[in-house]
Amino acid sequence: MAGAALVLLPKPLDGMVQDILQTLHPDLKLMDSAVFALHDASEHFLTEVFQDAGLVTAKKGGKDDEGTAHADKRFLQLARRIRGERS
């Protein structure tokens, strides 16, 4: 995702990954390249899900009184189901 704005900030994601790793396997350490790969995959996944949820929102007409479209939890869940993911 070169040149694009980040969806996830690297430091908080790195901290979360390290916390989970310490809980599951306290004796393991991740290389920087592995954390970068997780960050890249997470960015890609979230971008795709939000794009799909935006399409569902537009199709379902999820607009408020001012005409602004909002993707709520239902639209995110539907987008994930359409993608073949389990909720």
Image: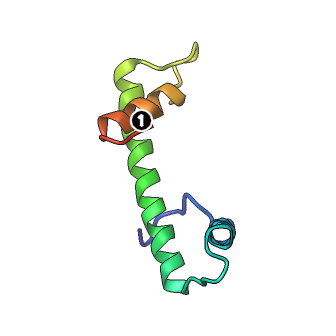
Give the quarter of the figure containing the C terminus: top left
Residue 72 pos. (x, y %): 54, 28
Residue 74 pos. (x, y %): 49, 25
Where is 30 relative to 8, above or below?
below
- Left or right, residue 63 beside residue 49: right
- Left or right, residue 84 beside residue 32: left
Element on which disc 1 rests: helix
Where is 66 relative to 1, above or below?
above
Three-letter residue code for mark 1: Ala
Residue beneath label 1, please? 53
| Residue at figure coordinates x 53%, y 76% from the top left | 35
Give the quarter of the figure containing the N terminus: bottom left
| Residue at figure coordinates x 51%, y 68% from the top left | 39
Residue 76 pos. (x, y %): 46, 34
Q: Return the residue nearer the eye: 28 or 70.
A: 28
| Residue at figure coordinates x 39%, y 29% from the top left | 78
| Snapshot quadrant of residue 32 | bottom right
| Snapshot quadrant of residue 6 | bottom right
- Left or right, residue 4 beside residue 14: left
Residue 56 pos. (x, y %): 37, 29
